[in-house]
Amino acid sequence: MRVLLHYDMDHEEPGLDIVNCDEQDDVRFKELLPDAEVIWHVLRPLTAADMDRAPKLKLIQKLGTGVNTIDLDAAKERGIAVANMPGQNAQAVAETSLLLMLAALRRVVPFDARTRRGEGWPADRGLVGGEIAGRTVGLLGGGEIATLLRGMLEAIGAHVLYTSRRPRRDDPAWRELDDLLRASDIVSVHIPLTDETHHLLDTEKLALLPNGVIVVNTARGAVIDEAALVAALTAKRLGGAGLDVFETEPVDASNPLLALDNVVVMPHVAWLTRETWDRYFAVAAQNCRRLARGDGLLHRVV
């Protein structure tokens, strides 16, 4: 079975003919599509035109959870199965979310810049950091990542609230979205990007946050209205942000968020650990073998 790993990484699995392709190399990708029976997909959008170049394609296997970068309607029309792997990157993303909270609170960006310029102690009074312990952290989402992160935060003394699509009023930590925003010192995003969640945190919602709040996003960039976020950060109404994702990726160097010293940024790599890759490949290989046997696929989306 020919598997096209759409990422610049070598990997071998018994019984699978795996070829890899850098996500930025569209020429090679188009050359490899005609023989691909399975695509192991990461982030570069997969379109109907791509699928039309792959007449043998039977399965698009998302290496991760979010399938917003796959044209699901096109896959369904062409009889191509789509599967994802929820939870396999949860540990890495939860840890990165905590990392970004700490980095924003402790002013890592300006301290790093000062240190590299040879400006050591003492720091000026504007660079006093903060601690997570004693703060209220509001999680947008109640899935596996949010659940893991909640345990980490509570272990170091934070008070954690969360909201979710389905009300959980029997849980004292659950809040309606607006109530959660008003009560939080830190807000962390852990929900998929859908028509319903696009720009969920817009100017109106961000205005509900108390002054000085830290906003963290390791989910999808367009859940937050970037223009509204830039305005709130520039006005110093928000205390800072930790962002692994952006509305347009890869993020352009001209994005105004990159010029702000109260913003910590990463290039959509919250999931990127050796341990995550091991879990990804285990599920992806298992689904290829299920496909070959005619068995049901794990975590089928389409």
Image: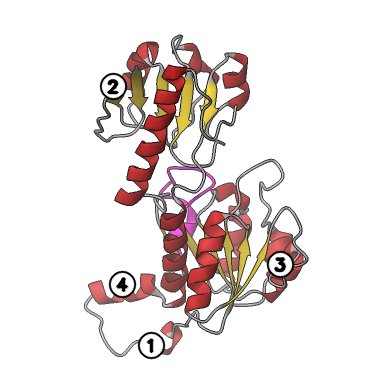
Which of the marked residues, 1 or 2, is nearer the chain's N terminus? 2
- Vertical placement of residue 258 versus 131, above or below: above
Question: In the depicted view, which residue is nearer to us: 203 or 13?
Answer: 13
Quadrant housing the N terminus: top left
The residue that label 1 is drawn on is 124
10 Å neighbourhood of mark 2: few (<14), some, or many (≥20)? Answer: few
The residue that label 4 is drawn on is 112
Q: Name the front one of labels 4 and 3.
A: 3
Which amino acid type corresponds to the residue marked 3 in the rendered image?
Answer: Trp
Question: In the depicted view, which residue is nearer to us: 246 or 119?
Answer: 246
Q: Which residues are magenta?
A: 245-260
Q: Residue at x 43, y 46 (%)?
A: 252
Q: Name the front one of labels 4 and 2.
A: 2
Q: Name the front one of labels 4 and 1.
A: 4
Q: Can the viewer see residue 100 in this picture?
A: yes
Residue 174's label in the rendered image is 3
Distance, label 4 to label 2, CA atoms, is: 48 Å
Residue 15's label in the rendered image is 2
Where residue 102 sits: x, y (%)?
Answer: 43, 73
